[in-house]
Structure formats: structure tokens, C-alpha cells
Image (spheres, rainbow, N blue to C red):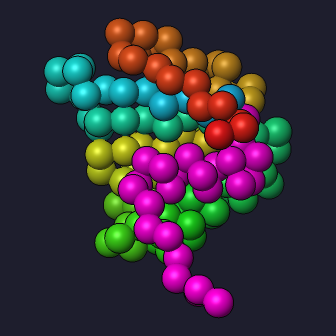
Amino acid sequence: MNTEIEEKDLKTAIIDAIKEKKGEEIVLIDLTEIEQAIAEYFVVCHANSNTQVEAIADNVERYVRTVTPNHEHPMFVEGTQNAQWVLLDYGDIIVHVFQEQYRRFYDIESLWADAKCETINDEE
């Protein structure tokens, strides 16, 4: 029996962790062509309750730490107290986990409308 964990790159690990906890409407925003962007990528999703937002954020941290080659940890985590919008900053990738109403209100995708956006299929 092989107990080795398959190593994954950071972007893939984050997306897989979100899918595992049923994050909805996962979008990868590619900021690599945007001058002075604060990161290379944003990963954005939403959940239906603060409990699910917390579960997704916790799972991203745990899963990424487990499967990435350097056992990545976020440099900064914000929003866990009210879990309406949790931000996990991995340097080159920033993860935004919203409750749906806050995602619609802040509409990050349209703020970065000149960036390439890729909707991640739940089936992948």
C-alpha cells in the first residue's frame, strides 16, 4: 500500500481544497499581465454560511500545507472572526472565500476586469 501523498503546485492544491469543501463558483483571476498587481493570481469562491466559509479556509490551509512540496503556509490570514470574507495570502496567490452576498457586493472579478478570468469547473 502506497501511503505517499502526491505533491501538487500551490494553485492546484488551493483549488482542490476549495472543491473538497464544496466552494461555489471558483474563479482563477490571472494578474500576471497587470502592472503593479499585488499578486500573480487571485482564487475566488463563495459559500452559503460562515461555517462553510471557515471550513473552506481551514481546509485550504491544511491541504496546502500537506500536499505542496514546501509545505506552504499563508503569510497572512484575515477575516476568520466573522467569516463573511476570509482572505489567505500565499504571496503570489491570494485566496478569497466569501459568503455569497458579500462576494456579490464586493464583486472582485469586475474590479480586475482587465485580467484573465477562468471559471473552474466543479467536475474537474
Q: Is residue 110 left or right of residue 103?
A: left
Quadrant for the N terminus in the image: bottom right
User: Picture coordinates of residue 88 (x, y %)?
Assistant: 47, 52
Quadrant for the C terminus in the image: top right
Q: Is residue 112 visible?
A: yes
15 vs 38: above or below: below
The residue sitting at the front extreme is 1
User: In which image quadrant can residue 122 be found?
Assistant: top right
Q: Residue at x 35, y 61 (%)?
A: 75
User: In which image quadrant can residue 46 be found?
Assistant: top right
Q: Residue at x 50, y 70 (%)?
A: 6
User: Picture coordinates of residue 58 (x, y %)?
Assistant: 63, 63
Q: Is residue 50 visible?
A: no
Of 25 and 55, the residue lying toward us:
25
Residue bounds of the magenta highlight: 1-24
User: Picture coordinates of residue 44 (x, y %)?
Assistant: 55, 34
Of 115 and 102, the residue lying toward us:
115
Q: Residue at x 29, y 45 (%)?
A: 92
- Label tally: 0
Q: Is residue 34 left or right of residue 6?
A: left
Of 86 and 30, the residue lying toward us:
30
Q: Residue at x 49, y 12 (%)?
A: 110
Query: Is residue 5 found inside the magenta-colored segment of the image?
Result: yes
The residue sitting at the left extreme is 35
